Image: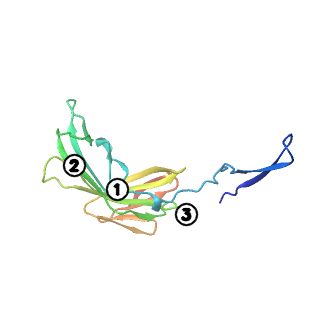
Amino acid sequence: MIRALVVVVALAGCQGSETKRVDKVPAPVGSAAPIPEPATIDWKSLHYDLGSLGSVKATGGRAEFRVVEEEDSIVHATQAPGETRGWAGFLDVDDPSYVDLDGDSHDETAIPFELKSAQLVDVPHVFGVFVFTLRDGKLLKLGTLTTSSKPGFTIEGSTIKTDDGRRWTWDATTQALIERR
């Protein structure tokens, strides 16, 4: 909580003796600024990095895009209005789950997703979870875990467990999300 300081200034040379109130709010010092909590972020309306496809913007939990292959065989996702080249793709993000992976008393966020980016109808969708934390008030992606089905993961204590038996935890030494076998 920031308190306002009240400063009383005596004005000399004016008619009579006047006082003026000036309210000043001191700037936050060091880490005095509140750290945002993950539950305050609209996770269904953010930009998501899809690796080699690039980034797409979800709105209300869904990002629709076209997957375009350029002349140099580079494939990327585009959300440009009116784009007709390539094939349709989508990213659906579900409600997040929260877990304190690194023991700092601030929750990280696990966001389940379904991704369709392949051209063929019979190619399976990719299911997974994006894992984010907040550092210095900014989002930092810790990793993307893929699973064989949707929702495909559970949180047990400070561990993210996928439906195929893989377990992911925070490693304090490497400062990374790692798979534990």
Seen in the picture, residue 88 relative to 3 is either above or below; the reply is above
From the image, tell me which residue sits under label 2.
Answer: 89
- Which sits earlier in the primary sequence, circle 1 or circle 3? 3
Q: CA distance from mark 1 to mark 3?
A: 23 Å
Residue 56, given in percent of the width and then of the height, sits at 31, 46
From the image, tell me which residue sits under label 1.
Answer: 145
Seen in the picture, residue 73 relative to 166 is either above or below; the reply is above
Residue found 52% across the figure and 53% down from its top? 173
From the image, tell me which residue sits under label 3.
Answer: 105
The quadrant of the rendering that contains the N terminus is bottom right
Residue 112, given in percent of the width and then of the height, sits at 33, 60
Quadrant position of residue 83: top left
- Could you tell me which secondary element the residue under label 3 belongs to? loop
Q: Nearer the viewer, residue 32 or 171?
A: 32
| Residue type indicated by callout 1 | Leu
- Could you tell me which secondary element the residue under label 1 belongs to? strand
| Residue type indicated by callout 2 | Gly
Crowd class of label 2 (few under 14; some 14 to 19; many from 20; radius 10 Å): some
